[in-house]
Image (tube, coloured by chain):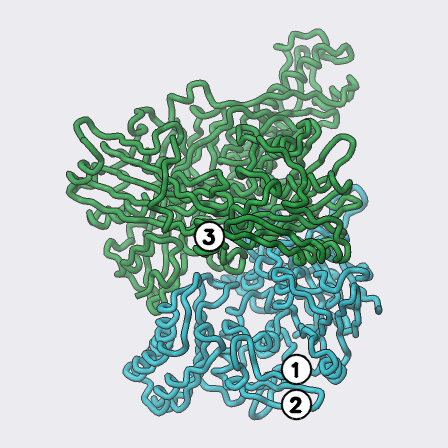
Amino acid sequence: MTAEILGRGRARVEGPAKVTGAAKYAADLHPSGLAYGYLVLATVGRGTVTAVDAEAALASPGVLAVYSPFNPLKLYGGIVHSDQSFLGQNWLPLQDAEVRHHGQIVGLVVADTFEQARRGAALVRVVYDARPPVADFAAALPNAVSPGPINGEPDVLDLLAPGVPSIEAALAAAPVRAGGTYTQPPKNPVPLEPHATVAVWDQAGLTLHLGTQAAMPSALTVAAALGQDPARVRVLSEHVGGGFGGKLYTWAHPLLTAAAAQALGRPVKTVITHEQMFSVTGNRTPVHQTVELGASADGALQAVKHEAVSGLSTSGLIFEQAAHTTSRYLYKAPNIHVAQKVAMLDAPPSTWMRAPGEEPGSFALESAMDELAAKLNLDPVELRLRNYSTVVPGRGVPWSSKHLDECYRLGAARFGWNRRAQRPGSVREGDWLIGYGMASAAYPGNQFPYTMAKVRLRADGGAEVSSATADLGTGMRTVLSSVVAERLGLPGERVAAVLGDSVLPMNYGAFASAGTASTATAARAAASAAVAQLVQVAVQNAASPFHGLDPKDVVYAEGRLTGPGGLDAAFGELLTRIDVSGVEAQDGSAPPPDARNFAVHSFGAHFCEVRVHAWTSEVRLRRFTSVIDAGRIVNERTARSQIAGGLVFGIGQALFEGSVMEPASGRTANANLAEYLIPVNADVPVFDIQFLSHPDTNFNEFGARGIGELGTVGSAAAIANALFNATGRRVRDLPVTVDKLFG
Amino acid sequence: MVTARITVNGKEASISPVAPHTTALDFLRERGLTGTKEGCAEGECGACSVLVARPGVNKPTDWVAVNACLVPVAALDGQEVVTSEGLATPGEPGTASTLHPVQEEMAVRGGSQCGYCTPGFICSMAAEYYRPGRCAHADSEGDAEHGPNGFDLHALSGNLCRCTGYRPIRDAAYAVGDPAEDDPLARRREQAPPAPVATEYTQDGRTFLRKDTLAETLRVLSERPDAVLVAGSTDWGVEVNIRSRRADCVVALDRLSELRELSVESDHIEIGAALTLTEIERRLDGEVPLLAELFPQFASRLIRNSATLGGNLGTGSPIGDSPPVLLALEASVVLAHADGEREVPLADYFTGYRQSVRRPGELIRAVRVPLPLSRVTAFHKIAKRRFDDISSVAVAFALDIEDGIVRKARIGLGGVAATPIRARAAEEALEGRPWSAETTEAAAALLQAEGTPMSDHRASAGYRSAMLGQSLLKLYAQTTEAVSS
């Protein structure tokens, strides 16, 4: 039974609810008396709102209120972005007349029905004193500034061998050099579920249904903005329709919606449109990188130089840390230089998006490695093996567990890498040019500072595990149920997992690929604590057959307590007999105390085959092999889905995705799913995803590391490298659209 | 006001008092059927997909999946709709419902991850599950676009997923079997579809109108020249949702029998303007190879289930996918007016950006494709994404080649000018000359100079121009390969 619950994996526990439409997302809630909010967004890229004419909107059927900078809802300032407040931007909506970027919220219309609210919003006339925005990333590059330290290290970090004066000197001394400039546009997480919120007030305070990756920090943020006691704000997020980083922070619309519901004395629902998502919620910043690699003739790296400039919205907060998260440690080299700058833009808020930093960084570094391999006429896998790092450069500490070399070898064997032609453009099948490419993946194994979970054993013989995390499709419910079922020796279906509620035991949420390491570890500890509690109750309760025994003599296994003299009872029977509805206990997880002695990363190697049409340069992906080293895999089925989904993000990065910002206006020209292209079914090739099984018990008791973002790291480089192999054309500007390959 | 009624999951409901621009999606969700999701509100993502009972091609009734976000609910007056909630069989009180076979496969094979796109995938998959003849095409291997169970992967082309990587969804689709004998939706196919009903639905001073006959409709148009004409609403729905457009009067054409005929005459094929692209595709069944090549490239199955040829020509978009093909086929449009009909060659129909010779009070009744068809045809749509995408450039060829000489050449282009155009210079450079590398290279050079393509985020002007020439070279290479092999 145990083997069945963990490892190969159960089907997703909430699958039936999702396939029948029964699963409720925030926008599906419909409390009685509900009114609807619809946002009004700025149509200039920078400036001031000088007037708002709401007359026509207010006269439109069903419209209840029009809020604007001149009729604002009160929000309290002074919110500091911190450990527990996750406000996604550095200003609060409608509290001043400033327009900081195109598509910023400048109004909220509330009406009796959704159709009336959106009609009303279309009738609001906003007058601006417009100023030209700084919205051209390329033009802003020369003005880029230091962002301050990155991960506790200097933004310009030189790790040079003794006697080497500079990275330039190390490069100059290297006989073979390769690299270039790598660029990519801003992106949006575009989860299929648009951001949505429903605010309901009663005597107990505010209940906010909000699709979020982080229910507890959201509740604290909303409480602060509304000037409320945090105990009076509860955030519910039962199901979340994808997040990818975009639903980690708290954006402006739930604050306004909650305030409007309070002002109007009615529940209010605001669902932002996909178009609005591009400016109301956060984006991945554009990135400009240069990588220069220097190597000796045998392929040993002598110098790695990686400099990145990322955009950063003047509204805050996050920028892509491309070099420090990749070239800093991925290869063994005596001389490493990484540097990061930011170029300020009057753009929608910059935020986290799947594999922040590693996504652009791995594209640049792993493309440059491919270019170096080509110059050396060396197999790209062999080049990586020759520069394999076993300790973190400059720090000297080893990894908690690293089997990337096995990923390379197994991946190459499964993929048939030995059939790759070293000479680009030399393999053709009919009208199609064939290319093979590969790249490495590495993403930090994260664990939250502390995480709590509760396990309750019930008199009906079932159990429940709870923690204030979220399941955005990651499989967290299934993982928690399975981990606790395995520890308790119960069938999986007897253990319910409850999450998505800010009042549950402390959890930062679902992000940074830290979910399984943090929450599964806490849940397992809580299950053990619940068993200990059960034993205590069994020996202390006078009606219990175990009464008076030494707890050490009572053994729990497979859902039963046994003791001396043939004492034996299923815990449900015992609790029923002693008339106790259930016993419960909380416990937590935290990173190991010797964490500084190890670096922790999950690793992988991607191999892909592409076809490029000889006449039109159209690209088709044929297959991917990815071998993943992520410690113990709790559920292979949901894990495989996570890696496949990550690979599809890499496909999007390589071939499709990018927001097009008009330099003059700061408007995103393709803010919709018709023109911001994400891969469709037919774009997706066959995936051969393999997991190594090396439990990482240096990292946590359970031995699991994160996988949610790993698939995205390096996969775009694998595709770009395969395109080079197919055509001989190196494209360093993403996405690789057909016109860049043609000619 | 006449009340409009709709049957959802077997239960009848009144539409009133919702506003006429309320979408079917909002209507369903307001009534608690929140399984149907709103994703993009413009027919791109398919999260809102629902099943509608429509006149069948091979059986009396087909279950067809459509984007509920684009259809005004008033357009479904008298129709039957099934949502993801309605596919499962409810259990006894207190017990779980029994999953529909497509739901079962999706749940078991991990086809649902975050779950938001799932009900839409379920409905698209169910429509294909019930497609008559699906299993007749089944073979044990399947191919790149079909499962071993005959499942056509294009059925899912209008559904986006951002989580799963699509493979588990494909696995689920390829695993479903045949509907059971007593499956109520399978049995429903054997009965007549819901009859079209006349609708006059007014709320807040705005009207949705559906007349019984073409004559009545034309009379309305002469009285209401401001009326917006809709068939599948795939374009108008986007205008309403995204660009906040509203109309005082919307007139539906999609059920007019005079616009829904398809006839093959001795010298032409006439295709009713209100037939959906899916209906045309299935009824022609490959008879016009150039159209058969077009259909899989045209938007997605969800859109093709609603969109019509009349609508694609009526909106006059320069990047519509059907005009290049119809231009190459030398098609004409039949324009109906209260005063009578006229036939206009498509090449003379477009006059400017989204403008045409169609006069107020006139509507497109049918499209005529002359016979016989040219033997060598090809449609090349260059887009960034494989399906469900707007073309960067589209080229259609129809050539008659006899004894190695090009007797006739017709080339239609989209995406290179303010209107779809014929490539006359390249046609002339081909006609009367041998079908040879030399001829095609010369014609390709002329083809490349056609139109005035723009640079935008879809493609550069240079690439668009180059693709025009390349598509002819590609066609030549393909035909000569075919000859030599």
* Disc 2 from disc 1: Cα separation: 13 Å
Give coordinates of residue A429: x percent, y percent. 33, 65
Q: What residue is rendered at 74% in x and 19% in y?
A: A574
Q: Which mark is residue B360?
A: 1
User: Quick one: which chain is cyan?
Assistant: B
Secondary structure at numbered mark 2: strand
* Disc 3 from disc 1: Cα separation: 43 Å
Q: Chain of mark 2?
A: B
In the depicted structure, whether residue A371 falls above or below residue B51:
above
Q: Chain of mark 3?
A: A
Q: Chain of mark 1?
A: B
Q: Which residue is mark 3?
A: A132
Secondary structure at numbered mark 1: loop
* Disc 2 from disc 3: Cα separation: 54 Å
Q: Which residue is mark 2?
A: B341
Per the rendering, the colour in which chain A appears is: green
